Image: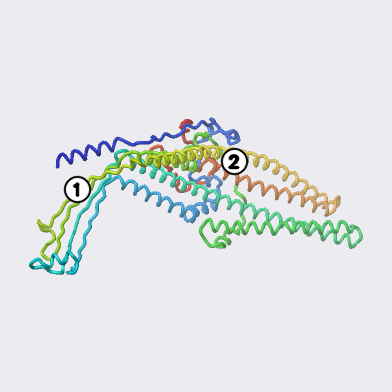
Amino acid sequence: MLRHTAFIFALSSLAAGCAVGPDYQRPITELPGAYRGSGVLGDAVSVDPSAATELGTWWTAFSDPDLGRYVTAALRQNLDLAQASARVLQARSGLDAAEAALLPSGNIAAQTARSHQSTEMPLGQVLSSLPGYSRFGNLREANLEASWELDLFGGLRRAKEASSAEYAASEATATAVRLAIAAQTADTYLQIRGLQTRLEVARKQVQTKQQLRSTIGLRFEKGIASELQLHQAEGALSQALATIAPLETALDASLNAMDVMLATVPGTHRAELAVHRPVPDLPTFWLTDTPADLLRRRPDIIAAERRLAASSARIGIAFAEYYPKLSISGLVGSATSLASGKLFTGGASQAGAMAGLRWRLFDFGRINAQISQAQAQEAEALAAYRQAILRATEDVENALVAMDKRRELMSVLDMGAASLLRARQASGAAYEQGVVSLIEVLQADESLLRVLDAQAQNRTDAARSAVAVFKALGGGWTLDAANSSPVAVMGNPPQPTKQVVYTDAPSDPKR
């Protein structure tokens, strides 16, 4: 028994130190030291870090309590996020199963049976000639069985490694869904506020066109205005009225989309959102992150990297099939047969031990194909990882450029609106003095309202571009260096502020 025990421990030690297949190393990725568009985001050196907004609650940078309330509610009850969380639990179960495969397994088996022997069969004919023969028989058995596959060459450990990486990838994917839900909720809210502002401007345009139509109509009746002017005024009024329906349709769709994001029936929040509020101001950014920080912040990159690690481990699983698999099993129990035996007595005890060997010795062609398939899957995962990095960098650059251009356009439109407002005031003063007619005043109103509509639309797009920047940078999610799994830094929303600082220490670009 001591020799057998020592042999088993020796095999266990061998199993603990040997694992075939490649050992995964995170790929080296060369990235630039700064974003091309980072110059538009301000200088972080002059910013007080205590005034920074936590990236985990980036929506508070807009200083809009309603926006923060809806985003928080969506993160708590959105159904897409619930599905992602369920997929994480599924991946966790797969990891538990892979860990359990490394341990011995045991089970208890028991059975009882009663039989009636035929005397016409050869066995019955022999037994019936014996003294005290009974055609009835009983069988009772109870056993404790245990088995253990010794992971000599690391196939099971590679399977656990793959399951662990897949579990981390599922967590990162759920994190990506969470970030997308927050960004989409904020984007929908901004669209609602922007459409409400544009509708208000459009209704004022209709009022202005109606006044212009009425004025020209009176002048036409008196023979002062031509029929062409009347028809032009009527066409302008129809054109202004035609802008109302598309805006109302888009607003209804955005209100319904907000309810779906909050996992409620469309129309639930319509009344409270119907109260018109302006589009939130664009937050001020200060950026210290580099493109290399995306490797640990963007959840889609984290998920791609963990899938690459899982595909590398699966190569080891395939390589392990080259080698023999050894298992040991044992049985301890009690069994009785016929009517005379009693269970759990000395005579009824039974025990057994077995060592098993399985080796696909003449199946190397199929194993070679499985290894080639696993290596090709790793190559695919590597390309997907590198593509995810490039896409993430592209997202950030595009978002920064879009926000910069929206800011420039906002400045232009602000100046245009200010100029047209002064022109409207001047025409109004001239009208009161009898220098110009009401038509000139209404035309000045029309020009002002057109630029106000463009201003409202651009302000909405600028705020949405800020949301896109937060999303492209990965929000407030980081990669835990200890276990390469994503960590959420969500917390209670701090006091609203428009200062946003990225203060995380930059990671190694070659990581």
Asked where in the image residue 358 lies, by quadrant, the reply is: top left
The picture places residue 281, in percent across and down from the top left corner, at: 60, 46
Marks 2 and 1, Cα distance to the nearest angstrom? Answer: 67 Å
**Label 2, on which residue?**
399
Instruction: Check the image and report above or below for 4 versus 430.
Output: above
Residue 342: x %, y % from top left: 11, 62
From the viewer's perspective, is 243 left or right of 374?
right
Q: Position of residue 255 (x, y in %)?
A: 59, 58
Amino acid type shown at disc 1: Ala
Q: Nearer the viewer, residue 414 or 336?
A: 336
Residue 353 numbered mark, or none: 1
Q: Nearer the viewer, residue 82 or 126?
A: 126
Counting residues from the start of the chain, the first of labels 2 and 1 encountered is 1
Marks 2 and 1: CB-CB under 8 Å?
no
Looking at the rendered image, the quarter that the N terminus falls into is top left
Disc 1 element: strand
Res 488 label? none
